[in-house]
Image: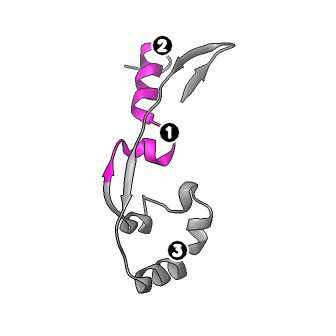
Amino acid sequence: VCVMAGRQEWSFTDTATLRMRNFSDNFLTHYLETSVSTCLNSVGGYQIESSGLQLFETIHGDYFTILGLPMIPLLSCRRQKGLIPS
């Protein structure tokens, strides 16, 4: 994430690692039948905040980073700059 105000004011990079679990063809068929519309409209083709969570064995990293925006560091930056109350 990068905060710009005419120039780069702040940036933060984070990484999250998700390991998919082994699952049966029957599970995959059911998952796709019940979740295809959300899968096609999601970054990565799953929604970890919904039924997509069932695809994974382990998850390491920040939840908001997985969703696409590391909110905790961004909010900290905004507080430090006096943009939101601290």
Circle on res. 35: 3
Q: Is most of the magenta stretch helix, strand or loop?
A: helix
In which quadrant of the rendered view does residue 65 lie?
top left
Looking at the image, is 23 positioned above or below residue 21? below
In which quadrant of the rendered view does residue 6 lie?
top right
User: Badges 3 and 1: C-beta atoms under 8 Å apart?
Assistant: no
Q: CA distance from mark 3 to mark 1?
A: 23 Å
Q: Is residue 31 left or right of residue 53?
A: right
Q: Residues within 10 Å of mark 2 (few under 14, many from 20)?
A: few
- Nearer to us of marks 1 and 2 is 1
Q: CA distance from mark 1 to mark 2?
A: 19 Å
Q: Secondary structure at mark 3?
A: helix
Q: Residue at x 47, y 25 (%)?
A: 12
| Residue range of the region highlighted in magenta in the rendering | 59-81
Q: Secondary structure at mark 2?
A: loop
Circle on res. 81: 2
Question: Residue 13, percent across and down?
Answer: 47, 29
